[in-house]
Image (cartoon, grey):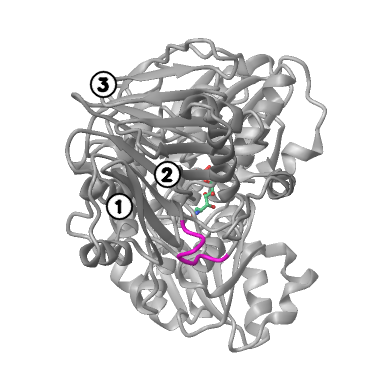
């Protein structure tokens, strides 16, 4: 999704803006641009495609200035061309925008009547045009921003730069995230703390409705109503070093390999390693024992973590769970029991649909809990209880370590709930705790078969369609396997509950469609194997993801087998997640795809 940066500085800003935009590349984008005040004049350079294209332009046609704004654009309105790239500018003002201006059409009609006409196909240009009109009518830059923002509907994080106003950037936030970085005699703005991490670790997050006047010396923040606002100064840990690839070719590979550590940190939050017993380190603000039902909402991979969680909460805690994707939940207007618990899962903590579902639940009297990675994100800040993933920045657009950390958090919470609700006796609890304790080691073992998976993935990369099958808590992993493969290799893939195969999708099966069957040895394996036989009978080619026991009894039926470590069925989905991640990763690498920044995708989806 779009990323924005700004520097009100005292030294040249161009290289630093490019550096900060590079930190935002992970969000996904298709064009980029910067604008500076060059001796008071607004100057800009923009380019379609990757940041390197913009950097090349700047080498041929350099810019000067100590005040500037920059943008990576993820196209919503209008193709990803240089013309549509931000900053949008008139001779008086330049603007970068993340979000969607929903009423831009009616505003354009209004502006056209006054002789202001757009030159791009974007919704964002209207912001620069409106601000220009107010400036032409004699308003000061700050008043022009206020007047402009008061007319905007939709979601936005905006930065404004003004002709002749050296050192001034005006910012506004409604819906899309925006942070201010505090330097020494310089101030910075960015979509997230990562963008600011090159310059400072002192960060203030704007709230919805806030706007700020930023100069090299200070940032004055005001609320929508013009009241002076004081926002907390955070010390961000998004340091420079942790966003390097290290020895890995891609961030995704690095993040896949970070999973044993990431999961170990989550387990350590819930399990006392000295005694291998469940601990809740700080008291919960809600009571699992008396809950009638839990509502879960999330998007994409985070939703699939919740879908696995549902199996765990229902089975081990006997707690009914309603789960839906954020984009559907927000408009269903589901009735919610008073004083219920609503749980939201998100890596970024900024996903617009998840946030909207959260706000609906908050307005309907639910206790809001969230499982998030970015600790200072909007979802975290609007939650009554936060379960942090602590897995560090996830840069690859395809979520990997956040997914397994989300799963592990949900597994731990499910047994916390099971104990609180009297659904687990001591022996059962000890067995599940044991499974979680051995999880990091098992994940490390799963990673040792990477070369075998890479070989299988090379074959898979020749297919145009792939099916993934799983049962029970492995069914959402089948969906995740299909999602991962689609996202980064662009191979069409679908996931199904294994039992659903014969209700339709089996029509697709022939020798050209590989079928990935996820079937570790558990109480359902025989059922899944029957579905596998149905595939074999129709000439389908099976890639079986199982463990040694499953391979010994059923491996002969598969063309290829991916051998995962033998674990307790409780944690088998977390292990199988690694297998499907590696399969997708190596298929994509083999196809030469842009693994970390797949086409059309954004890391942080801050629009509907
Ligand atoms: C994961 O691989 C995806 N790119 C995507 O589905 C993602 O999980 C989804 O957009 C939700 O993001 P969030 O976890 O930041 O809320």
Please tell me which residue lies in front, 383 or 202: 202
Separation of residues labelled 1 and 2 (CA atoms)? 22 Å
Q: Confirm or deny contact between disc 3 and disc 1 (CB under 8 A).
A: no
The residue that disc 1 covers is 22
Residue 540 falls in image quadrant? bottom right
Q: How far from the left and from the top, in percent, is residue 248? A: 22, 60
Q: Height in image: 170 above or below 446?
A: above
Q: Which one is in front, 340 or 148?
A: 148
Is 341 displayed left or right of 453 in the figure?
right
Return the disc, 1 or 2, that comes first in the chain's sequence.
1
Disc 1 or disc 2, which is closer to the eye?
1
Is label 1 in a helix, a strand or a loop? helix
Q: Is residue 428 visible?
A: no
Element class at badge 3: loop
Q: Nearer the viewer, mark 3 or mark 1?
A: 3
Tell me, yes or no, whether the highlighted magenta stretch contains residue 529: no
Asked which secondary structure carries label 2, the reply is helix
- Callout 2 environment at 10 Å: few (<14), some (14 to 19), or many (20+)? many
Query: Which residue position is annotated with label 2?
Result: 402
State if disc 2 and disc 1 touch (CB < 8 Å): no
* Residue lying at 33% horizontally and 61% vertically, measured from the top left: 51
Residues in magenta, as a range: 79-85
Quarter where residue 360 is shown? top right
Q: Which residue in the structure is indicated by mark 3?
A: 217
Q: CA distance from mark 2 to mark 3?
A: 37 Å
Q: CA distance from mark 3 to mark 1?
A: 25 Å
């Amino acid at each position: 999704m779009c990323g924005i940066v700004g520097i009100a500085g005292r030294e040249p800003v161009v290289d630093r803006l490019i550096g900060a935009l590079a930190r935002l590349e992970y969000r996904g984008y298709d064009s980029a641009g910067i604008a500076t005040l060059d001796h008071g004049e607004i100057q800009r350079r923009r380019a379609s495609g990757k940041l390197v294209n913009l950097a090349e332009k700047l080498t041929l046609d350099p810019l000067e200035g100590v005040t500037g704004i920059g943008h990576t654009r993820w196209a919503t309105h209008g193709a990803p061309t240089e013309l549509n790239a931000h900053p949008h500018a008139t001779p008086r003002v330049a603007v970068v925008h993340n979000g969607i201006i929903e009423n831009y059409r009616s505003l354009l009609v209004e502006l056209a009547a006054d002789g202001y006409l757009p030159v791009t196909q974007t919704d964002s240009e209207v912001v620069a045009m409106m601000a220009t009109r107010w400036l032409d009518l004699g308003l000061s830059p700050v008043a022009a921003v206020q007047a402009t923002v008061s007319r905007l509907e939709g979601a936005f994080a905006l930065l404004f730069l003004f002709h002749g106003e050296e050192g001034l950037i005006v910012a506004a936030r409604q819906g899309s995230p925006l942070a201010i970085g505090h330097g020494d005699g310089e101030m910075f703005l960015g979509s997230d703390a990562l963008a600011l991490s090159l310059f400072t670790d002192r960060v203030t997050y704007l709230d919805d409705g806030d706007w700020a006047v930023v100069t090299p010396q200070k940032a004055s923040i005001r609320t929508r109503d013009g009241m002076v606002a004081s926002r907390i100064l955070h010390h961000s840990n998004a340091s420079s070093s942790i966003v390097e690839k290290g020895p890995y070719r891609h961030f995704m590979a690095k993040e896949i390999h970070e999973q044993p550590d990431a999961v170990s940190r989550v387990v350590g939050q819930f399990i006392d390693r000295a005694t291998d017993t469940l601990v809740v380190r700080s008291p919960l603000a809600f009571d699992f024992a008396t809950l009638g039902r839990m509502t879960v909402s999330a998007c994409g991979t985070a939703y699939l973590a919740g879908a696995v969680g549902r199996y765990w909460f229902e089975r081990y805690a006997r707690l009914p769970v309603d789960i839906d994707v954020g984009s559907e939940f927000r408009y269903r207007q589901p009735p919610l029991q008073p004083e219920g618990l609503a749980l939201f899962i998100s890596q970024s903590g900024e996903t617009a649909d998840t946030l909207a579902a959260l706000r609906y639940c908050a307005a309907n009297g639910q206790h809001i809990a969230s499982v998030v990675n970015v600790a200072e994100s909007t979802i975290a800040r609007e939650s009554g209880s936060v379960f942090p993933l602590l897995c560090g920045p996830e840069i690859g657009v395809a979520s990997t370590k956040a997914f397994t950390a989300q799963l592990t958090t949900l597994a731990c919470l499910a047994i916390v709930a099971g104990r609180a609700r009297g659904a687990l006796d001591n022996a059962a609890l000890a067995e599940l705790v044991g499974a979680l304790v051995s999880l990091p080691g098992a994940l490390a073992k799963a990673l040792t078969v990477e070369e075998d998976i890479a070989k299988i993935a090379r074959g898979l990369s020749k297919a145009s369609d792939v099916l993934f099958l799983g049962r029970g808590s492995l069914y959402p992993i089948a969906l995740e396997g299909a999602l991962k493969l689609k996202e980064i290799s662009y191979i069409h893939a679908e996931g199904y509950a294994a039992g659903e195969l014969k209700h339709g999708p089996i029509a697709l099966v022939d020798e050209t469609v590989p079928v990935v069957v996820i079937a570790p040895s558990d109480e359902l394996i025989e059922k899944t194997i029957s579905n596998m036989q149905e595939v074999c009978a129709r000439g389908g080619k099976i890639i079986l993801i199982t463990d040694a026991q499953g391979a010994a009894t059923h491996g002969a039926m598969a063309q290829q087998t991916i051998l995962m470590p033998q674990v307790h069925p409780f944690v088998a989905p977390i292990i199988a997640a690694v297998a499907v991640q590696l399969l997708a990763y190596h298929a994509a690498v083999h196809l030469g795809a842009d693994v970390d920044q797949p086409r059309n995708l954004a890391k942080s989806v801050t629009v509907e």
